Amino acid sequence: MALEPGVHPGTLFSGGGVVDRDNTSGLKTGALDPIVVFANTNGVSVYYSNDNGQTFQAYDKGRKQIEIPNESRDPKVFWDTARRRWAMVAWSDQGGNGVNVYTSKNLLDWTFASRYSAPWLFECPDMFPLPLDGRTGQQRWVLTSASSQYVVGSFDGTAFRTDWTGPQQMDLGTTHAGGTFYAAQTFTNTPDGRTVQMAWQGGNRGSTWTGNASFPASLDLVTTPDGPRITRTPVAELASLASETKTWKNQTVDAARGENLFAGVKADTYEITAQFDVKDASATRFGFDLHARSDGSADRSVVYDTAAQTLQGKSLKPRIGKVELRLLVDRGQLEIFADGGRYSLSDNVDFDSAANSQGIRLFADGGKAKLDSATFTRLNTSWGTSQSTLAGNLEGPWHSAGGSWSDVNGGKRVSTSGDGFYISASSGRDAVYQGDITLDSARAAGLTFRANASGVGYTANIDTSGTVKLWRPGKDIAAHSTPITAGQAHHLKVQTNGARIRVWLDNGSEPVIDASDTVYTGGLFGVNAYDGTATVQNLNIGTGGFTAFPAGRWAARGGTWTVTPAGLRGNSAQDGFYLSDRSGGDFTYEGDLSVTNGTATGLTFRAGPDGVGYTANVDTSGTVKLWRPGRDIASYTTSIIEGRTYHLKVRTDGSRLRVWLGEGSDPVIDATDTAYADGLFGVNGFAANTVAQNLEVS
């Protein structure tokens, strides 16, 4: 989740975002350009990411950078090239529907510039320039509403103006919230100069989601006898999904003969382009039945009425006696383009993907229609081979070998009655392989390696019986008895060196299993679960992970703690602790800490197994604080920003407790307290997503 209620402040309604490639905001902290997004209602708040959108922070604690006293939402920000500054349109109901226009040099400080009001201009506005007929120097500005209505005019950097008396309709679908085309937004200022649009198709829904995105379409502005009009053309990159093509030329579609030129074509996701010569057509109607069945039924028919000159009941006049169609068919989704992109109709259809429902019929009713040409193209998935919620560096495509595997916010979840495997395309012989395993109702789950496509190989797992086990089919190679907690993430790491196989649990310094076996020398990486449900996350090959002082097994006391190549990640609704088994009295303890989102994170020391002890933390309210349960011992006021990494160092000498921030030579806290003389080392998070790394004790 990019922006999550309860984690990020504000009303997280729709908005817009930009890549701040010139760092006009000053929010950049590393090598990557900030992504800056805008949301909230009755005003505008700013959120930003410095890790390519993996995590987002709220600027100024989410306080509104623009206050709008009326009902408002849906800020859209764009770069105004002519004035070299940013501009924004935001819908509000001030005196009726309309947009407020704001300008900014830095994306953070905004100045009200003007207001454009119109009865049709309701929510989710967009505004962008397009060259008329592609000509340099003939730039026009387009202002759109959520329902795809638009007007064309000019923008002088302050105000939008048009001489149009009413809007045009960009798409002919059902253009209301929950309909088949709504709240479209554009990608502008692209490297190749295209303006690319995608819309929300809310008519497609499942049990846990609502709506899909429309196919990306390039927008152009062309001259017509009625004035400038927008055209929508599917992006050329769709060709990269093509896997099979069939073509037909100079054919007659005859209702009397009842033949189907597309007989034998079976497809679920595809594209059809066709040109018909209608000058002498005797057919009253012609078109395509999509997802057709042998009983004559179909999930949707795309019909051209020759007498009414309509396509799907919408006006489409022939050009020089020709009608050209382009159909894009996806699961739950149909988009129709015609007339060089002037005709665009987006639809949601409950297509039946069963094998006996994937036919296509080209038909004519009441006579003949001449087909000049047609092309069928099968479209493969656009999702690539990576995983949407399973983090890690293993290559795809992945496949299941037993069990039902599904995407959840915390990774990949399996439900299986016996052994279930999920296998990547990555393979290896000697490697370090690690990941986070959570047993829900499953008896066991773990890391599979040196396996074949069916999962036959080695598995190192955790078992609710209280065991870490290394096994292969037919043999339990080694086991280690230790408590395993259901519902809690446990980190497993495996290292293979020839026949030697070692297994680590929960970031301990020493392996809990050190064994030898020679049956499998190489193979695929994956995961396994047995008899129930389990969740896996952060599957990585390599030595990167949580770097910390030598210790045995770490233990969670509140919160969720997982390991990525960036370090130890924590998620805690209130206080959460992750504790080592190493203890000390007088020492120096230091590490790198970051609050990704939320309140605070810190170094815990002299603690009991429940985390009760001292904690020195960084708090995004603007403090470094030394505390123990029941008492804030001392604090130091300084700016602490979400997403930034801070180095904390603690030194204890009897009752004297000192805390350093960064590389400063002097402590920012120097206090005394006698409550705890010694105890465990660990980390703490409070109401936050956190990262800890490079923990050292001396």
Image: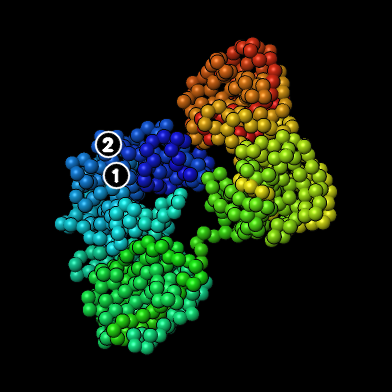
Colour option used: rainbow
Q: Position of residue 269 (x, y in %)?
A: 47, 68
Q: Please indicate whether residue 177 sits to the left or right of residue 630 in the image.
A: left
Q: Are marks 2 and 1 in contact (CB under 8 Å)?
A: yes
Label 1 neighbourhood size at 10 Å, few (<14), some (14-19), many (20+)? many
Q: Residue at coordinates 21% horizontally, 57% vertically from top-left? A: 167
Is tag 2's residue or tag 1's residue first in the polypeptide sequence?
2
Q: Secondary structure at mark 2?
A: loop
Q: Position of residue 533 (x, y in %)?
A: 61, 47
User: The residue under label 1 is which amino acid type?
Assistant: Ala
Q: Residue at coordinates 66% horizontally, 36% vertically from top-left? A: 485
Q: Is residue 587 visible?
A: no
Q: Please indicate whether residue 665 sits to the left or right of residue 483 in the image.
A: left
Depicted 58 relative to depicted 288: above or below? above
What whole-number distance in Å separates the C-alpha atoms at marks 2 and 1? 10 Å
Q: Position of residue 393 (x, y in %)?
A: 62, 51
Q: Which residue is mark 2?
A: 68
Q: Residue at coordinates 54% horizontally, 32% vertically from top-left? A: 572
Depicted 155 relative to depicted 194: above or below? above
